[in-house]
Image (cartoon, rainbow, N blue to C red):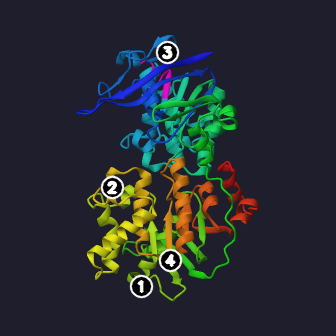
Amino acid sequence: MKILDIKHLSVYFKNSGQSDFCAVNDVSLSLEQGKILGIVGESGSGKSVTALSILGLLPYPKAYHSENSSVIFDNKELIGLPDKDFQQIRGNKISFVFQEPMSSLNPLHKIGAQIAESLQLHQNLNKQEIKTKTLELLNLVKIPEPEQKLKAYPFELSGGQRQRVMIAMAIANNPQILIADEPTTALDVTIQEQIIDLLLELKHKLNMSIIFISHNLRLVHKISDYIAVMYHGNLVEYGTAKQVFEAPEHDYTKKLISSDLLLNLQQKNDNKTIMSVQNIEVAFPRKKNIWGRVIADFKAVNDVSFELKQSETLGIVGESGSGKTSLALAVINLLKHKGNVVLVDGKNSYNLQKFSKDLQIVFQDPYNSLNPRMTVQEIIGEGLSVHFPKLAKTEKINKIKEILNEVNLTEDILNKYPHEFSGGQRQRIALARALVLKPKIIILDEPTSALDVTVQAQIVELLKTLQSKYKISYMFISHDMNAIRAMSHRVMVMQNGKVVEQGTAEQIFKHPQQPYTKQLIKASLL
């Protein structure tokens, strides 16, 4: 039985001085009772705008629908429904779970109060009944120590716990439909798996229908009964999960599936060692005495040693808090540490001026690591100015143009600023900034995690091409086992600051020894 019927949905945004922008174009979908509809597509494909249209959450009147747009729920037309009537539906019959819980939860209110607010709005319960129901909800979404968590603020919870709180708020009034918009994107793979399993369990317990929105094809395939593929505002493929994956018809769907990072394992690299990392420890003070002396600390990195070979990619994998990024910052001497980092020619990380030209880092979020007030030319040229101060201006510009060409960008972007580019383009600019100095080693800290699946594949292929051409070595840091598998010759698995397992990519992925490694691989749907 259809519980939601979307017909000829189109969404436009007014664009002053230019023609209006069409974000969703003539989309027709339906949702069956007790089923899960997965909507997949890249950023800007219209997934979230479609979902927000259902609950009338678009910025009207800047946004508007075509005259024949229709969304029918419970025999009621939702397009154009007055806001007072929508209040009986939002958070009650249809609930929404957003991508980033820290943006959705009020940082000044305790968790218990925020869940209670939803109950007070739609149910006639007294104070004790609300507390009892709130505890039931926290237990239902498997929050540990629910009595304590009622009194906690959002910042005191982990990312996975915050997402569980959002789900508890969404199901508080037993909705008929739950819309989950990228609910697992910012989470580690093992936490992603737990959230997916939780949604499936709640669907069965509450006989709930779910619209699951994601750019992660693997998750959508795992959870969905039906899949809708969107591209540039259009619905390009629609069918059962089996049909879409086993017999895709549209070229874009085929491209999405083929862009999957589950590529052939990299072969063992027997080149000479180019860097030796010995007994690295990074500690942060946890407690000080009255004189300010540290009497207890937290070891973010605990006695880690490894070697990196020329033209090799060492994949470093682990969940948030495992010590991956702290290790990278210690290697490049941006964090105080014990231990030693030595390049094969004897340069030591403590001599940062000489060392940094040979060892560069590309951070996870290029938007935050690129200076918004500097042009592309200034960003890429900054390193040349530091290390080659006598370089002529024309030669400097030529080197910048050459490196832009290497990362598949054109020289007409030289005078543009970071905000004018897509995520994938910004990551290429960050990579060009590192490459222009011709380093021997590049540390890549989650370089693909914020990107769409097709862009991820492009960046991975670019990195491999550059490695082959310039004999660069990579420290490739990620919590995504698929990206690690696609890139790495050797893999080092970290948990709680320690190395729990390391070996060739083939050893780790085909014959993992440690339970934690096996758990990571299983959670990645490999």
**Magenta stretch: residue 97 in it?**
no
Q: Is residue 81 above or below residue 511?
A: above
Q: Which residue is mark 3?
A: 72
Q: CA distance from mark 2 to mark 1?
A: 31 Å
User: Of residues 317 and 302, which is closer to you in this image?
Assistant: 317
In primary-sequence order, the first of circles 2 and 4 is 2
Secondary element at tag 2: helix
Which quarter of the picture shows residue 396? bottom left
Q: Amino acid at mark 3?
A: Ile
Residue 418: assigned label: 2
Q: Amino acid at mark 2?
A: Pro
Q: Are marks 2 and 4 in contact (CB under 8 Å)?
A: no
Of callouts 4 and 1, the N-terminal one = 1
Residue at x 45% of width, y 32% of height: 233
Q: Which mark is residue 351?
A: 1
Res 105 seen here: no
